[in-house]
Image (cartoon, grey):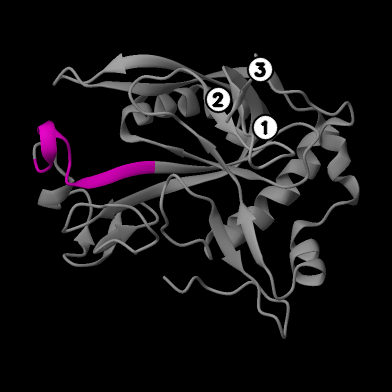
Amino acid sequence: MAKNTEITTTNNAGFLALKNCNLSDTLNEELAGLTVSFDRIKIPSGGGTVFEILGDNPDEPETVKEFSAVILYQHALNAYYKNEYTGGSNPPDCGSYDGFVGEGTPSGQCRSCPLNQYGSGKNGAKACKNRRRLYLLREGDVFPMMLSLPTGSLKGFTRYLTRVVTRYGSSNAVVTRFTLKKASSTAGIGYSQAQFSVDRPLTEDEYALIAAMAEQVKALSQTVGYDNESETITVNVNPETGEVMEPLA
């Protein structure tokens, strides 16, 4: 059962704790032969306004109304399933990691694909689900978490990114505050919509450390496959070489 808290707590060391941390070295040297998981920050369904975040006890995740983190890296994630998706880690029939080109069946340009148009799916939605995968680092942590933004949150996220990039130059130059509000689709279906605001800009020393980790996370993101959005994502490490391997799915 999740325990309720108003906000997450952070370590006073802040992002300067990354000074002696190298994510790639940790994965290659300490976790060889193991499956490394990026824990998920979960958005509820049906209009809920609290996030679920794994804490020290994985059996008792925290539910929080807001949290703050740096967006280390983020990218599009499109997925089309010919048959209705029922869970599990099966790869989609067609998927895209950049939102531009799909691989699989039917494949091709995402923008002009009939399955990527509103009305091609249930209740006027798209048959191809558009999401945004965010790799986030909370203050005091040294290992990123993942947040998968659903379609209903993408418009607001785009507006937020535009403001941040225009003013600060990069989305990972600031600490972002995440909250949720209840919204409704044109069909009257309630859903949870993520909201974004700038908590604070990073200091020069913090940004240098964050930028270095962002490059490592960007490289690791290429090894993360499609998976059940309600579960953790795993990255496989070769037991013989210690190198991060491509996903099996």
Q: Observer-nearest residue: 122 or 168?
A: 122
| 229 horizontally vs 96: left or right | right
Q: Observer-nearest residue: 249 or 103?
A: 249
- Above or below residue 61? Residue 128 is below
Q: Position of residue 120 (x, y in %)?
A: 9, 43
- Above or below residue 209? Residue 46 is above
Q: CA distance from mark 2 to mark 3?
A: 28 Å
The residue where tag 2 is placed is 164
Q: Position of residue 248 (x, y in %)?
A: 46, 74
Labelled pair 1, 3 in contact (Cβ < 8 Å): no
Labelled pair 1, 2 in contact (Cβ < 8 Å): yes
The numbered mark, 1 or 3, whose residue comes first in the sequence reads 3
The residue at 41%/29% (across/down) is: 158
Q: Is residue 170 visible?
A: no
Badge 1 density bin: few <14, some 14–19, many ≥20, Cα 10 Å: many
The residue where tag 3 is placed is 5
The residue where tag 1 is placed is 173
Badge 3 density bin: few <14, some 14–19, many ≥20, Cα 10 Å: few
The residue at 85%/52% (across/down) is: 21
Q: Residue 45's quadrant in the figure? A: top left
Q: Amino acid at mark 2?
A: Val
Q: Magenta part of the protein: which range? A: 120-131
The residue at 16%/59% (across/down) is: 82
